[in-house]
Amino acid sequence: MLIELRGIHKTYDNGQPLHVLKGIDLGIDQGEFVSIMGASGSGKSTLLNILGILDNYDEGEYWLDGKLIKNLSETEAAHYRNCLVGFVFQSFNLINFKTAVENVELPLYYQGVSRKKRNELAMHFLEHFGLADWATHYPNELSGGQKQRVAIARALITQPRILLADEPTGALDSKTSVEVMNLLTELNRTEKVTIIVVTHESGVANCTDKIIHIKDGVIGETTMNEQHKASVFGTATIMK
Amino acid sequence: MKDLFEEIWESIKRNKLRTALTGFAVAWGIFMLIVLLGAGNGLMNAFMNQGDRFATNTMAVYGGVTSKPANGYQVGRGIELNDRDITITQSALFADYVDKVSPVLYNGPYTLVFKSQHLSTYLCACNPDLLDMNKIELLFGRFINRNDITMQRKTIVLAAAHARELLNGGEDYASLLGKTVTGGGITWLVVGVYKTDRSAQRVEDYVPISTIQTLHNKRNMVGQINFSFHGLTTREENEQFEKTYRAALNRAHKAAPDDESSIWIWNRFTQNMQMDKGTHFIRRALWILGIFTLVGGIVGVSNIMLITVKERTREFGIRKAIGASPWEIMKLILAESVSITALFGYIGMFLGMVACEVMKMTVGQSSVEFFGETVQLFVNPTVGLGISVGVTILLVIAGTLAGISPAMKAARIRPIEALNET
Ligand SMILES: Nc1ncnc2c1ncn2[C@@H]1O[C@H](COP(=O)(O)OP(=O)(O)OP(=O)(O)O)[C@@H](O)[C@H]1O
Ligand SMILES: [Mg+2]
C-alpha cells in the first residue's frame, strides 16, 4: 500500500472541541485514481490536509510510502511535503509576484536544484501542459484553467508519490473543469501518478476509478467506478 | 545565494516607500553615530595635540607660595626655584628615577629685530636637555649646547614661524644661521631653527640659561625645572615620588615638607593617564548615544518586517506547503532585514563621513584664542577604518536583531492556517 491510514482521529478545538475525523481507515495503492465525496463540513479537506502533511492528527497512524508520518518536526514535515506529495488547491495558491515558470520551479529550489536545471525542468512541464507561451506571465495574466494547470505542474515537478487535489475544479467553469480533469486522467493513465481528488461534483468524481464517501467523520461506502458510469448525468460529463 | 538576493530585491521592489522610510531611520541613526564619533574624535585629537607637545615622562616644577608656617616663617612666602633645586633634582636621592634636568626661565617679551623685520617674543632660557623633553625638532643648525652654557654665549635657536617672519615670509631659514638678531638690547647669534606647526600655541625662541642668568643679574634663578624620569608607572608610584621630591625642595626652602602650594609639580605622565581616562569616557558616552539613536532605527526595521510578515503570511504558507523549511522562511526575512539595515546603514555612514570631512574643512580650520594662547577646537574630526569595520559588524548585528522576531513569527506560520486566510 502506498497510503495507509489506521484509526485516524482529528478534533479541532477552537473554544469548543469539534470531533471531525472519528477513526478513518483507508488504504490506497500505487497508481490509483480516487475521489473523496461527502457533505460540506464532513471532513474531506481535513482528511486531505492530513494526507498532504499540511496538518497533524490526534490519534492513529498514517503510513506514506512505508514511512510513519507522525510527530514530525517542521523541518522533516517540510522535507516530506517537498518530495513525497504534490498539492493542488481550489484557489490555485500561486505566488502572484512570480511568473508561471518561477512558480513551477520553486519546489526544486527548496531541494537545492541548480537554477539552470530547475528552469529547464519547469519549462519542460509547462510545454507538456501546453503553457510554454505563458511561462513568463504572472498569475493575474492567466485564466483560471491556466492557473490550475500551472499549479498542477508545480505539484508534480518534484515527481511526488501522490498528487492531492482539494476541489481542483471548484473555481472553474464546466469547460475548463473538463480540461483539468482530462489532464489529471491522462497523468494517471500515462505517467501512473497516484491521484486523490476531493470534490462535491459527481461529474468530477465520475472521472475517477474509485469514489470514497465520507460521512460523520468515518469512511462510508466505496464505489468502484472503472466504467465511469457513476454520474447520474451520464458518462463523461461534468455538471455545474 | 543569488536566488536569495533576488527574492529580497523582489520584496523591496514591492514595498518601495515602506523600505525607504525604514531605511531612512537606519541611515539617520548611523549618520548620527558617525558624526558624533567624528566630532568626539576631533575634540580628543585637539586635546591630544596639546599633550603631544611634550614627552609624556616629564615633570615641570614651579615655585609657589607657602600655605603652612614653618621654621619661623609666616604663610604666604613666595618660593623661587634656583640652581640648588637643580642640584637636588640631580642628586643621588632621585637618581633612580630622574634622567635629564633642565631649568626653564622665560624672559620677555622682547622685540627681535633682523634687518627691517621685527617681532615680539619670549626667550626661553634652558640647557641642552630641554631638546628631548619638549620634543623640539630642529630643521637647520643645532640646539643650545654645553659650550653655550659654560661660555655663556649669546646664541639663539629660532622658531621656524619666527624665522619666517624675520625673513619677511621667506622660506630659506638656513640663511639665517650665523646671522645675528637683536633683542632686549643684545645681539644674538642664530645657531638653529626648529620646526613649529600651526597648532603650536605659544612660540618661543631658545637661549642658554647661563647667559640670561648673567645678563639679568639673576644668578641662580631658574624659573621652573623640567626633568624627565623613568620607572614610575603607576599613579601610586608617581604620587610617592612627588611627595618625597616636594619634601626635599621644601626643606631646601625652609618650608613645611608637606606644603603642596609652595612647590607646584605638573606631572605630564599622570596628566596623560587622566586624559586617557577622559577620552575613554567621552568615546564611550558617544558610542552609547549613537547606539541609542541606532536602536530607534532597529525598532523601525523590526516593525516594518513584522508588517511584511503579516502581509506575506499566505505566501509563506504556500512556500511551506510546497516544502520550504522554517529555516528557509527565516532566511528570507533575516536576509531582507540585514540587507535593508546594511544598505541604508552604509548610506548613512557615507553621508556621516562626508559631514565629518565638511567639519574638518570648516570648524577644523578654526581656532580660538584662549588666555592668549591659540587653541584648535577640532583636529582631524574623522573616523578611522577601524570604526568603519566596527560599524559594519554593528549593522549586521542590528539587522539580525531587527529581523529575528519577525523571522521567527514567519517561520511559525502553519501552512493550512495561512492558506485558509483569504
Ligand atoms: N482550522 C479549523 N479550526 C476549527 N474548525 C475547523 C477548522 N478547519 C475545519 N474546521 C471544521 O471542521 C469541519 C470539517 O471541515 P472540512 O474543511 O474538512 O470540511 P469539508 O468536508 O472539506 O467541507 P467543504 O465541502 O465545505 O469544503 C467543519 O465543520 C469545519 O468548520
Ligand atoms: Mg473542503
Image (spheres, coloured by chain):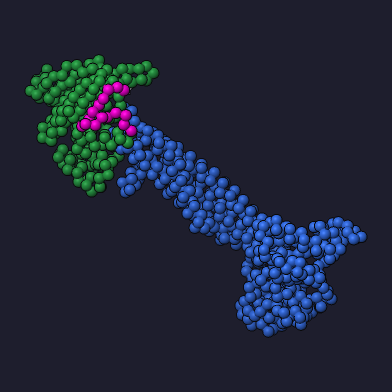
Chain colours: A green, B blue
- Point out the stretch of residues depicted in magenta: A58-73
Residue A137 locus on image (x, y percent): 23, 41
**Residue placed most toward the observer, B175 or A152:** A152
**Residue placed most toward the observer, A157 or B296:** A157
Residue B344 as seen in the image, left or right of residue A4: right
Q: Quadrant of the N terminus of chain A?
A: top left
Which residue is pictured at 68% across the width and 61% down the height? B232
Which residue is pictured at 53% across the width and 52% down the height? B34
Residue A192 as seen in the image, left or right of residue A72: left
Residue A87 locus on image (x, y percent): 23, 32
Q: Indicate yes or no whether the magenta region holds residue A68.
A: yes
Extreme residue toward the right, this view: B72
Q: Is residue B54 above or below residue A118?
A: below
Which residue is pictured at 23% across the width and 45% down the height? A118
Residue B47 locus on image (x, y percent): 64, 59
Extreme residue toward the left, this view: A227
Which residue is pictured at 71% across the width and 66% down the height? B96
Q: Is residue B50 visible?
A: no
Q: Quadrant of residue A15?
A: top left
Residue A219 as seen in the image, left or right of residue B116: left
Residue B213 locus on image (x, y percent): 80, 75
